[in-house]
């Protein structure tokens, strides 16, 4: 079989040369930038950070530090503010069968046997993650991601010893003696830990864009020599001679420390593809020895191979999880908060340092001196109570020297640059946005600004959950299923991350809910639901108690409900009685109407019977028909009189209407003065 290109004589040489190429690629492209980002976040000054050669001030503005801490705090609050960080759903929707001790776990889901469910597994996994201090490790990884642009974690499986208080019966004593011995019970079980890895201690194939697409990844760091010796003693590492090696200071956790620890070893832990021939030469047993590369785990240190084996994990995954703070297309390394605000931070530092340097020139007392009039050998300095000797008049030899006043515009420029840092990083708070130069101080302006900030934070949160948190939980569960099958039976689970809103997002949503709550009536069912939503966003210790109280208040009162039912029954009975009374009245009215109709039909017959036999002889009188005819004539006459009167009345009404109409149509004539009365012919005129 031909030797692959680039493969060295042994496994150590191949791995060392391959990882050194990856190290050179990182140092030539990213190392100097990452070191400067770290110094800006820590507030550490370096000679290379000067913006001009005459710069004397070393101040570093805290704007970028605030942006990093604020952004990380938002992600941490959104991810860890709930009682459970994640939830588990069994895809098979079946209970899990525990695996007896000593048997190997199966790769697929098992048939139900009762006992455990997804909620029990979730509680156990939460407990073990707390035991392994995942919360602090994830917080450190978030800091690394915000500073360097990439958060990286290594999943490590170790054996842990648990001690729990216990009591046992004293041996040799009868059981009814009730004598027990108190102590601690020791139990050894695996624990899965998360090791945060700084970018300078992580090497990856330069052609890769993610962990799975890389040829391999390597954790290159210093570890304590005692840790190597313990793993050699337990049989995890090979028993070879290891000496201390602390030569490479660029790999230490904090290169700013003047004194570095000495008892440490340079170790490389490689996870990825390895030439199969090199593994066979090291005596590694492989299932498929015909392939060119094999997924393996290799650990080297001090020129020796400490461990070499095929991938031991049941899902054949790499125990590395990583996520970028912001994705850079077609590149593994992402863009962090420090890179976003780098230029604004450098401009702000240059502005503040220039101001401080100019302030020293304007505030420190300086004197202009004629050197020919100062006694030889005199040390000239200015301080209170100092006696100054001059050859001649002091007014001609010494004079105060002042560079002028500091320009006030630098203060506004510094404030604008600080706002630019916050705008670039998206970590500005509501107070800073409200007083910014381009911000609208109205409620609508602040609301729109907060909405823009929350969108950027939500984008980072989703990236963290999908690229880091879900794979981390999944791989952690796989490790426990493989190495602790008694507590974690193998099954195919679906993991969902439980997250909430960050601090700013919660305040913004609470404000909106409170505004809506003002227009919702208290007796509406929506009122209690909105009140629960507001309390759910609060970070108070009595939140659960308040929610339980609201739920209890919304439940119906049995006594009040019973009284309400009784009132409704009484009201229904009253309505039924009223309906029955109305129906009775209607029936009575109908009977009375029938009676009147019958009486009307019987009245003529009764009259005929009454007046047809006046002599009471049992026969109709002879003149009865004449009386009837006369009565009809009288009735016709009365009817004619009535019709005549009605016609005369109608004629009179019509004549009156015509007169009124004529008066309305005639134009109004002007009123003339009344004429004097004419004298009568018989009256004689007065004498002249």
Image (cartoon, grey):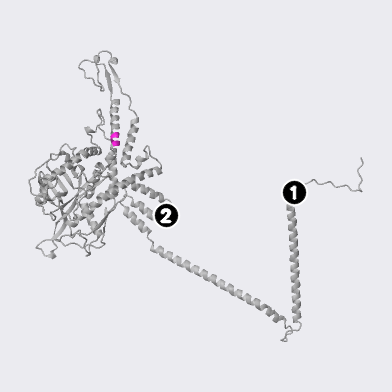
Q: Which residue in the structure is indicated by mark 2?
A: 522
State the image coordinates of residue 212 (x, y, percent, origin top left): 21, 50
Q: Position of residue 509 (x, y in %)?
A: 36, 49
Observer able to see residue 225 = no
Q: Which region is colored magenta? A: 343-348
| Circle 1 or circle 2, nearest the eye | 1
Query: Does the stretch in magenta take in 346?
Result: yes
User: Callout 2: few (<14), some (14-19), or many (20+) C-alpha neighbours within 10 Å?
Assistant: few
* Magenta stretch: includes residue 323: no
Q: Position of residue 607 (x, y in %)?
A: 70, 79
Query: Mark 2: which secondary structure?
Result: loop
Q: Give the answer, above or below, for where 590 lies relative to 13.
A: below
Q: Nearer the viewer, residue 323 or 244?
A: 323
- Main secondary structure found in the magenta portion: helix
Residue ID at (63%, 77%): 598
Asked whether residue 543 appears in the rendered view, the answer is yes
The one of 213 and 375 positioned closer to us in this rendering: 213
Q: Is residue 161 above or below residue 404?
A: below
Residue 557 position by quadrant: bottom left
């Amino acid at each position: 079989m031909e030797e692959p290109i680039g493969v060295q004589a042994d496994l150590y040489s191949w791995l060392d040369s391959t990882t050194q190429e990856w190290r050179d690629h990182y140092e030539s492209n990213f190392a100097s930038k990452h070191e400067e980002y770290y110094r800006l976040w820590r507030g550490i000054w370096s000679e290379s950070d000067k913006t001009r050669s005459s710069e004397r001030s070393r101040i570093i503005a805290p704007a970028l530090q605030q942006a990093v801490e604020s952004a990380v705090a938002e992600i941490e609050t959104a991810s860890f503010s709930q009682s459970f960080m994640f939830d588990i759903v069994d895809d098979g929707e079946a209970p899990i069968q525990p695996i007896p001790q000593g048997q190997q776990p199966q790769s697929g889901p098992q048939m139900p046997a009762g006992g455990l469910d997804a909620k029990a597994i979730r509680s156990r996994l939460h407990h073990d993650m707390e035991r392994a201090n995942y919360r602090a490790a994830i917080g450190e990884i978030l800091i690394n991601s915000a500073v360097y642009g990439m958060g990286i974690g290594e999943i490590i499986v170790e054996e842990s010893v648990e001690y729990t208080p216990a009591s046992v019966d004293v041996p040799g004593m009868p059981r009814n003696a009730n004598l027990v011995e108190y102590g601690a019970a020791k139990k050894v079980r695996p624990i899965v830990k998360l090791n945060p890895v700084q970018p300078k201690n992580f090497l990856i194939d330069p052609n890769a864009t993610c962990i799975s697409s890389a040829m391999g990844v390597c954790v290159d760091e210093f570890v304590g020599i005692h840790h190597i010796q313990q793993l050699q003693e337990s049989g995890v590492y090979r028993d070879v001679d290891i000496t201390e090696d602390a030569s490479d200071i660029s790999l230490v956790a904090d290169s700013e420390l003047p004194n570095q620890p000495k008892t440490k070893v340079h170790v490389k832990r490689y996870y990825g593809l390895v030439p199969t021939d090199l593994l066979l030469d090291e005596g590694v047993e492989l299932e498929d020895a015909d392939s060119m590369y094999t997924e393996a785990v290799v650990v080297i240190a001090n020129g020796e191979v400490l461990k070499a084996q095929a991938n031991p994990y049941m899902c054949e995954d790499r125990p590395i999880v990583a996520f970028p703070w912001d994705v850079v297309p077609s590149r593994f390394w992402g863009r962090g908060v420090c890179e976003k605000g780098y230029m604004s931070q450098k401009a702000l530092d240059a502005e503040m340092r220039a101001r401080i340097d100019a302030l020293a020139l304007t505030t420190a007392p300086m004197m202009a001196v004629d050197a020919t009039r100062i006694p030889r050998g005199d040390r000239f300095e200015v301080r209170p109570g100092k006696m100054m000797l001059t050859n001649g008049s002091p007014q001609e030899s010494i004079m105060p020297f002042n560079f002028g006043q500091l320009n006030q515009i630098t203060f506004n420029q510094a404030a604008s640059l600080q706002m630019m840092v916050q705008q670039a990083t998206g970590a500005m708070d509501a107070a800073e946005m409200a007083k910014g130069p381009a911000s609208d101080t109205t409620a609508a302006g602040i609301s729109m600004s907060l909405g823009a900030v929350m969108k950027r934070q939500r984008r980072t949160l989703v990236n963290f959950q999908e690229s880091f948190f879900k794979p981390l939980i999944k791989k952690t569960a796989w490790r426990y299923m493989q190495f602790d099958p008694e507590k974690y039976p193998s099954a195919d689970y679906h993991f969902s991350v439980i997250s909430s809103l960050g601090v700013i997002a919660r305040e913004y949503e609470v404000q909106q809910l409170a505004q809506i709550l003002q227009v919702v009536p208290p007796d509406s069912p929506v009122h209690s639901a909105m009140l629960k939503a507001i309390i759910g966003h609060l970070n108070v210790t009595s939140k659960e108690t308040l929610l339980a109280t609201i739920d209890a208040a919304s439940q119906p009162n049995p006594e009040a409900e019973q009284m309400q039912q009784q009132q409704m029954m009484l009201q229904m009975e009253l309505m039924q009685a009223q309906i029955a009374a109305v129906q009775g009245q209607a029936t009575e009215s109908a009977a009375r109407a029938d009676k009147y109709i019958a009486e009307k039909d019987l009245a003529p017959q009764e009259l005929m019977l009454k007046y047809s036999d006046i002599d009471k002889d049992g026969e109709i009188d002879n003149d009865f028909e004449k009386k009837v005819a006369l009565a009809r004539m009288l009735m016709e006459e009365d009817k004619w009189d009535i019709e005549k009167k009605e016609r005369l009345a109608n004629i009179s009404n019509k004549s009156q209407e015509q007169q009124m109409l004529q008066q309305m149509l005639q134009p109004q004539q002007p009123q003339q003065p009344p004429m004097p009365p004419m004298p009568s012919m018989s009256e004689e005129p007065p004498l002249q």
